[in-house]
Amino acid sequence: MIEKGYKRLSPLCFLPCGKLVCYKDGNLVVMNNEVIEKRYSIFHTKKEKIVAKSHFLYRGLRLGIRATVALSDELIVFSIGNILYEYNLKEEKLSEGFCLIDRIRPLTFTEVKGVEGFDDMLIFGGYQGNPEKKPVNIYRRVELDKWEIVHVFSQGTINHVHNIIPDPYRNCLWIYTGDFDEAAAIWKATDNFKSVERVVCNDQKYRGCVAFALPEGLLYATDSPLAYDYIYLLNPDTLETKEIMPIEGSCIYGCKWKDKYIFESTVEPSGIYRNKLDFLFCWKKGPGIKDRYVRIYCGNLESGFKVIYKEKKDWLPFVFQFGVFKFPVGKNESDSLYFQPVATDKNDLNLMIYKR
């Protein structure tokens, strides 16, 4: 059953205590059992307070908080544009921020805990368009507003990092990179990044953003607007991929919900543009996107996967963002799946709740 939650409320992350942190118009909003418990005013700019009230401007200007992670019940790390901030909920204090150069930002943060051969740490890989394949860094948080580079992908290797997956079963980290040719790859890192090797590449079936390390292997969905997409299981020993289920579009966002794994399918263009006008006024979906519906896939290896919800992409060109469903990060043991449709024709930018 689907319930409408709150208008224009973006779900960000779960605190370890189970409370949900959201964002709206310059405020962090903490929810407990779907009831707003407290608001924290963190930004006072006209962009976030006034301009953001327009759906079109909010999406077109890429306003709001992007990647987020809760390090404790008190401390949240998040990105706005290419600036990384930290907010202390107890002290109600926003850090000065750490600015990344060249419009680099994290697509997602990764918290590494209990992986043999690695210190516990918070990391992310650099994400930007980067058609020239300039060097791409992996960053590690040292302390408040201080980050250091722990690995560099050299010039000509990749476009960007999509995600880094801790694997306690095999004592390594798996790094998913994109987007085309040999840059579409899965890498294996060991020994605190002293060894980083590319294990599979040069095929769109290795281009992923959402993945989970399981005893059986790597469960992930592909992120390709150019080829048909699937949920795969990769055997880390043989490097063979098994098709679990075809999906109708590329997958950018997902999460774990109790014993279920959640993937979404995106409506997006090919990502290859002839000129700036083509970029600004592109309505044509990529050849790997089967239709104009955004879907949520829910399941696991034991019970299989099924579509539990879908919405149609709205009429605006893709410069006003792809049609996607976004999910809060962190451990969700509740009976509710929280998500936010973006660029859809019914519930654009609203917080939605799916009940079992």
Image (spheres, rainbow, N blue to C red):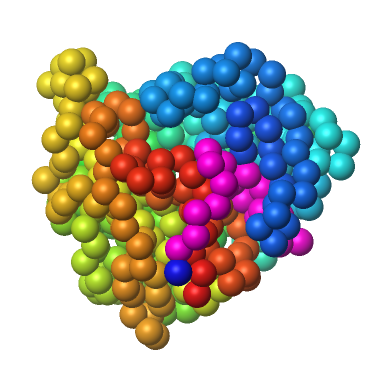
176 vs 76, nearest the viewer: 76
106 vs 157, nearest the viewer: 106
Q: Is residue 3 magenta?
A: yes
Residue 176, position as x, y percentages in the image? 39, 51
> What residue appears at the point 76 percent right and 61 percent down from the top-left corner?
17
Q: In this view, does 119 lie to the left or right of 302?
A: right
* Residue 202 visible in rendering: no
Q: Is residue 232 magenta?
A: no
Q: Give the range drawn in magenta.
A: 2-22
Q: In which quarter of the image is the N terminus?
A: bottom left
137 vs 265, nearest the viewer: 265
Residue 107, position as x, y percentages in the image? 47, 40
Residue 173, position as x, y percentages in the image? 50, 58
> What residue appears at the point 24 percent right and 52 percent down from the top-left corner?
293
Q: In this view, does 45 lie to the left or right of 61?
A: right
Residue 189 against residue 240 in the figure, above or below: above
> What residue appears at the point 41 percent right and 77 percent down from the top-left corner?
300
> What residue appears at the point 61 percent right and 29 percent down from the top-left corner?
25
